[in-house]
Amino acid sequence: MTATVTSPPPQRDELKPPRYRTIAGAGRGTWIQYAVLGVVALLVLAPVVPTLYQSFLDRPLYEAGGVFTLDTYVRLFTEANFGQVALNTVLFAGLTTVLAQLIAVPMAVLVVRTRLPLGRLAAGGMQWPFFISSLILGFGWITMYGPAGFVSVWVRDLVGTVPWNLYSIPGMAITEAVALAPIAFVFCSNALRQSDASLESAAQVCGAGPLRILRSVVLPMLRPPIVYSSVLIASMSIETLSVPLLYGQPVGIDVFSTFLYTNGLQAIDPDYGVLGAASVIILLVTVLLVWVQVKLLRNAQRFVSVRGKATRPRQFDLGRLRWAGIAFVAIYLVVGALIPIGGLIFRSFTQVFTPLQSPFDTLSMANYERIFTYPAYIQSIWNSILIALIGAVLVSLLAMFAVVVARRSPFRFGRLVEYLSLAPQAMPGIIVGIGYFWALAYAPASIGGLIQGTIWALVIAFGLRALPGAFGSIAPVVMQLGQELDNAARVSGADWFKTFTRVLGRLLTPALAGSMILVFVTMIKEYSPAVFLAGAESNVIGTTALELWVQGNTGSVAALATLQIAITAVFVGIANRLLKGRSHA
Amino acid sequence: MPEVAVRHLVKKFSSDNKVTTVLNDVSFTVADGEFFTLLGPSGCGKSTTLACVAGLERPDGGSVAVGDAVFADAEAGTFIPPEGRNLGMVFQSYALWPHMTVAGNLALPLKLRQLGKAQQRERIDSALDKVGLVHLRDRYPHQLSGGQQQRVALARALAYSPSVLLLDEPLSNLDAKLREQARAWLKRLQAETGITTIYVTHDQHEALALSDRIAVMSEGNMAQVGTPTEIYEKPAAPEVASFIGRCNFLPGVVQGAPAKGLLAVKLDCNGENVTVQSGLDLPHGAKATVAVRPEKLRILRADDEQPRHPHSVVHGRILRTAYIGARFEHEIAVGDLVLHADSDTPGTTDEVGLLLDPATCLIYPGETALPDEAAELATITS
């Protein structure tokens, strides 16, 4: 010890550390962490547990005197013809996955790695499914390419017959593949952007031409993203309701989701036991696929060496072949998305939509007038907006808390919070709908009756489906904020919750806003849980459109679809403008 | 101001079903007003020790106390969270909150202590004045240079007059020149405030220049605690000697004690005998390692006068000489070992003698466990 110690220390006026109240021996942080776990667990388990329970009961679970039975599973495969349904689903999902990859992989290589005219525009165009739901895409495809579609009729006039049949499993798969290809595109193009350019330079030095390099160096690198996105696309096409419902129902092709729809909604006396058993089996399949995804992603990350240094990917010159390339990209975007969506929007402004008579002769606003004369239809638009707005705020807040509890707290069950938050990925929308329907039916009348048939039931169900996306958009931002920022606040005298309100929460505000946009867009497109949950007063755009579709009111469906696209675009536009304005301030 | 007492600290981390012991029975006491440094290579457990004192990690065994207040006691199940400990801490990354101004950063701990606006202002100004940054009070952290950020972090840690100041490698993100200035400035500030300070670093120069006492840590254990002079001149273990400064290690066999307090050792490298001052009682024939620092070796020319007992000489050949400005560094082959020696003059002849003063030589029982890589570099392969 040196002289500094012997000199009398200067006058010090020490402050007392702040005091925080404890409740039942635990700080408020612990209570909040348990509360987050409780909310997330309740949200996830509420639809699952009643479904499991129902699948082993011989009568609806809300009726007294239920007897435990395995008979439901037997009947599912004998009477209900579930085997054929499973086969259809496998065919549909398999074909969709293959077609989506056939579209996405060449597209990613062309857009990212070759000098393509309008390449950036094409890359931006691949984001269209963000704004347009697959239900709307299905309407659009039928409007243009269906048996009586605009393009079909035009082709029949030209060659005497329509060389395709949309109402078939390949027809369903092509439409679904068009809708899901952008997912594979994102994974492949990210992998291509991150790839090391020196590998290709090495091949070039060895005398390989551009095509040779693409084939032997670039494509093998794409194997991990292709495998991963294939599993993702397969699981999404298993749970989708829209396209199978629109195409398969009229001709009697059933897949998992439409089987539930038919047996739960259209049967006069629905067999809840069989419905529950089918839900449980489908749930097992989707959970398995999500589990495979998680495993694959973990393995993939182990083999990818991410370098801090960003190397600009080289772009090959394809020469004359580039015109073939741009044609390929253009055909996908124009034929797959632009013509059906554009046609649907155009359809909404005409009375008669066929090449036999110029649609410009019957231009009118009648389709919109019909929607706006019926209060029920107006109500459903308001419901959609309201649900998406409320959901955007609530789900994003819940997701933010869940991320912070999972990643930035000493909470013992943090990991569990994360798994539960991501679990709805494996829950098809229609099963979420059935599950909550049973949960509300089984719940004490005071709670069940209060929520049943109101938009709050839909906020909860749609919100559950949007939770994984919100969690996934906030988590990376939290991981980028240094742990020392929290530690500094803790040592300075803030407890866990104060650290959140004063430091972490403030720094997460932009991520929260981004999550709100994402959740809003997800929820305004959502409808499949509402098929079971919506009451007379709580229809949304999607369910109303389906209803009008069944009535043959295609013009009004087109008008509703156009309105939904417009609402999404306006909201995203305003939100982006606001966010930009704030970041410059 | 109170003293800090850390007793039998144990910390284990488990990941993927594997439990690694990061701290293994670490004990030390920091006196009131002392500048105490935890020194060691990365992964030795020094930062974990600091985190246990701060309350950011919960120890699996042992206790931490400041004055009369027990912060953590694993046996009694006591654990006070960081916000209840009233400590000041500066982090390696400075951890300034990016959404607040300099004054805002300093104000938060004061607001949490529910201080009035006027008092807050007074304390913020006085803390910023100490670090000479009052004029930057309304800037945001990203508008400051690295050195300024580091000073703001220190001002934030001092503004609420904590009982102990914890510094976790606060200078390691500064460039070399700035670091030296910051070191002197930090030392002065600590002396002025008289606050008990625990400092964590892997930089031996920082540790030697700043500390009242240093604790050298190695693989979760306390290797030695002592003043800078003790640590440098009388390292308790070969690991300490090799970590602090540079050191030559010469394995050999004890040949008995020529006088009280002296040991004769026959070196394995070339069979020559050296005499070393030591309180150790090693029997004849025991394996031992002689350690000597490069600057303590004197290079003898042929015409230099021969040494008197008990000084001893080992003979070798200069392999290389490097001029590094302040001195010359020589690599000298002695048998199959390469020794390092410093001198003020360039090496002129190949064959030289190396003079060893028994008082500056150290001896450790057994063969030193030099890291393989270092051992390889020190051996001539021909």
Image (cartoon, coloured by chain):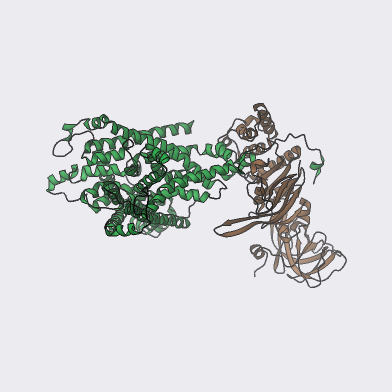
Chain colours: A green, B brown
Residue furthest to the top: B118
**How many labels were placed on the picture?**
0
Could you tell me if residue A111 is visible in this image? no
Using the image as rendered, state which of residue A284 and residue B260 is in the foreground. A284
Q: Position of residue B232 (x, y in %)?
A: 76, 54
Using the image as rendered, state which of residue A582 and residue A116 is in the foreground. A582
Say left or right for B74 vs A278.
right
Using the image as rendered, state which of residue B63 and residue B50 is in the foreground. B63
User: Could you say which quadrant of the image residue A140 lies in?
Assistant: top left
Could you tell me if residue A503 is visible in this image? yes
Residue furthest to the front: A65
Residue furthest to the bottom: B285
Q: Position of residue A43 (x, y in %)?
A: 44, 45
Say left or right for A12 vs A40.
right
Using the image as rendered, state which of residue A91 and residue A269 is in the foreground. A269
Q: Residue at x 75, y 37 (%)?
A: B192
Q: Residue at x 65, y 32 (%)?
A: B114
Say left or right for A21 vs A178.
right
Q: Residue at x 80, y 59 (%)?
A: B360
User: Could you say which quadrant of the image residue B265 lies in?
Assistant: bottom right
Q: Position of residue B130 (x, y in %)?
A: 70, 34
Q: Position of residue A561 (x, y in %)?
A: 28, 37
